[in-house]
Amino acid sequence: MAHTNRGRVLLGGLVAGLVINITEYVVQGVLLKADWASAMQALGKSPIVSGKAILIFNIWGFLAGISAVWLYAAIRSRYGAGPGTALRAGFAAWFLACFLVGLANYPMGIIPVRLIVLPSLGEFIAFEVATLVGALIYKEESTSAARSAPA
């Protein structure tokens, strides 16, 4: 039985995170920038996104990418290696990281529905593509290599 290759999870996850961060920038920081500025002003907040917030958003993107590739590595023994499994893992990661968060924010009425739905759709595409790319990078360790590695 092969073991999870943590180095490849990290490498594939960082590449997946880069895809997520680029997509988030385009969707949130370019296409919906004015909508977010209006929403923040309506809440009495600054419409300008701080450098600290951008840093945290980027860390989130990389952690999401790593999580998606880790999930792919975890389920590939059940579903088999390949794009179908990567798409399943991407969907699950998106569902947990994005869809449920949007669903939880919706009933409070603080964030306009447009700023819940449109980013979620962009994130869905981003997570699917990112997990596919990360899955291409991921390779499992063989059992013999894992046994010979120091503990």
Image: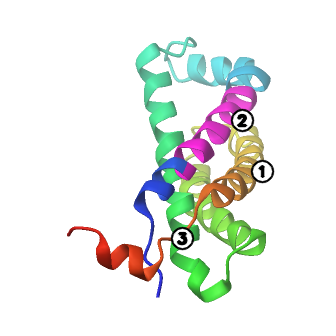
Q: Nearer the viewer, residue 53 or 147?
A: 147
Q: From the image, which quarter does the C terminus lie in? A: bottom left
Are dots 1 and 3 in contact, CB under 8 Å? no
Residue under label 2, please give it: 23
* Label 2 neighbour load within 10 Å: few <14, some 14-19, many 20+: many
Q: Which amino acid, mark 1?
A: Ile
Q: Position of residue 74 (x, y in %)?
A: 51, 75
Residue under label 3, please give it: 73
N-term-proximal mark, 3 vs 2 = 2
Q: Write down the quadrant of residue 85 in the picture.
A: bottom right
N-term-proximal mark, 2 vs 1 = 2
Q: Position of residue 54 (x, y in %)?
A: 50, 23
Residue under label 1, please give it: 125
N-term-proximal mark, 1 vs 3 = 3
Q: Is residue 34 magenta?
A: no
Q: What residue range appears in magenta?
A: 12-28
* Label 3 neighbour load within 10 Å: few <14, some 14-19, many 20+: many
Q: Nearer the viewer, residue 54 or 89?
A: 89
**Residue at x 68%, y 65% (from the top left corner):** 91
Are dots 2 and 1 in contact, CB under 8 Å? yes
> Which type of secondary structure does the marked residue at label 3 adopt?
helix
Q: Which amino acid, mark 2?
A: Thr
Q: Position of residue 135 (x, y in %)?
A: 65, 61
**Residue at x 68%, y 44% (from the top left corner):** 116
As displayed, is residue 109 above or below residue 82?
above
> Which type of secondary structure does the marked residue at label 1 adopt?
helix
Majority secondary structure of magenta residues: helix
Mark 2 vs mark 1, CA separation in Å: 9 Å
Q: Which amino acid, mark 3?
A: Ala
Q: Is residue 129 visible?
A: yes
> Which type of secondary structure does the marked residue at label 2 adopt?
helix
Mark 1 vs mark 3, CA separation in Å: 20 Å
